[in-house]
Amino acid sequence: MKYRRILVPFDGSDHAAAAFTTARSLAITNDETEIFVVNVVPMTLASSLSASGDPITGGASAFIDQEGYAAMVDASLENIKKEIDDVVEPLLDGMPAERVHIEAVTYPFAVSGLTEYASNHDCDLIVMGRRGLGGIRGVLGSVSYGVLRNVDIPVLTVK
């Protein structure tokens, strides 16, 4: 089966890089396939980041207006996007860069952010890394388990 739009959740881990490499292997055989590499930043974390991506520890920087807050979050998301691009670029290995879309988005929770992103972008496959640390949830981690249970498209987990 040829997939047209593959979502790769990306948290910077080696497992996420392995998931991207797997998605690239699937996508490179079809000139129309696109890969969406997405980092979902929980809103609670986004509200505590400075423009440099460092945590805000209080003081005057904690008191900003809504416009300043939006600018700070946008700058943090751009920094995350650049970090992802720095990791993904060497992994392209023949995959045209224009077919790889990198985004960092805020959402209340990673699972709901990923499932909504997949739906909104008509993704037909999710390839994601897993750590396999969750004893209660079997061999899948909590995010991969949550995504698997909340989408109607295939999910390939990579360790």
Image (cartoon, helix red, strand yellow):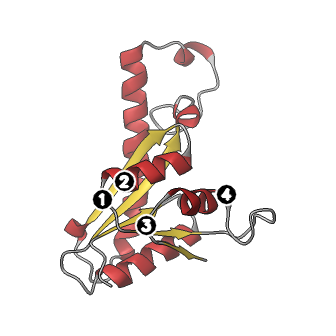
Q: Residue at x 36, y 27 (%)?
A: 71
Q: Of label 1 and label 4, which has the lower sequence position?
A: 1
Classify mark 2: helix, strand or loop.
helix
- Residue extending farthest to the front is 152
Please tell me whether mark 1 or mark 4 is closer to you in this view.
1
**Tag of residue 153:** 3
Mark 3 and mark 1: span between their CA atoms? 10 Å
Q: Residues within 10 Å of mark 2 (few under 14, many from 20)?
A: some
Q: Amino acid at mark 2?
A: Ser
Q: Relative to residue 138, is residue 118 drawn left or right? A: left
Q: Residues within 10 Å of mark 4 (few under 14, many from 20)?
A: some
Q: Of label 3 and label 1, which has the lower sequence position?
A: 1
Nearest the eye: 100 or 63: 100
3 and 2 marks in contact (CB < 8 Å) = no
Q: Residue at x 42, y 29 (%)?
A: 72
Q: Relative to residue 99, is residue 69 drawn left or right? A: right
Residue 89 image position (x, y, % from top left): 34, 69
Mark 4 and mark 2: span between their CA atoms? 20 Å
Q: Amino acid at mark 3?
A: Ile
Question: Pointer 4: what residue?
Answer: 142
Vertical relation: 35 (above or below) 31:
above
